[in-house]
Amino acid sequence: MFLSTFHPAAEAAAAMPAANRHLSIFRRCVDPDDRALLVARCARPGASLSGDWLLLLTARRLVVTRETPLLHRLRLHLNTNLRHLSNVTWRLDLSKPGIELAVTAIDGVRERFRMRLGDSDTVWMAESLLRESFAAKPVYA
């Protein structure tokens, strides 16, 4: 199920071909029967030259990877079950199509990611997926 839903989710959020480079890490983190809901390129607010980040939201997990800027090495940053996340909020930005997602991991670390999405329709589609996946309320900008 995961592989059959991964590529359509990445294409819908305009995350190809970066998603293909990160697929090997995602496959190790996600159960084969889990369904990919959203694959999006993202950045870390406040960390300008930290490399390219990719966020994967499945029905059960949130996985974030990064590619280092100089050597282009792939690294796993976050791999957690959705039940282990707390204080989940997001803010839509339709002027520069994207969503800023903030979560607190089980170890208490607050993580923030700004998903870069192609257009406002994709932003609304991603917001709908976040709303279905989390019980938090979005913050509208």
Image: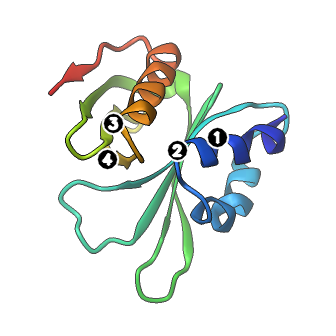
Q: Amino acid at mark 3?
A: Leu
What residue is rendered at 85% in x and 34% in y? 1
Circle nearer the N terminus (4, 2): 2
Q: Mark 4 touching mark 3, by CB under 8 A?
A: yes
Q: Which residue is mark 3?
A: 101
Q: Mark 1 touching mark 2, by CB under 8 A?
A: yes
* Disc number for residue 9: 1
Label 3 secondary element: strand
What residue is rendered at 18% in x and 59% in y? 46
The image quadrant where one finds the C terminus is: top left
Nearer the observer, disc 4 or disc 2? Answer: 2
Q: Which residue is mark 2?
A: 13
Label 1 and label 3: CA atoms lie apart by 18 Å
* Disc number for residue 114: 4
Q: Is residue 60 left or right of residue 80?
A: right
Label 1 and label 2: CA atoms lie apart by 7 Å
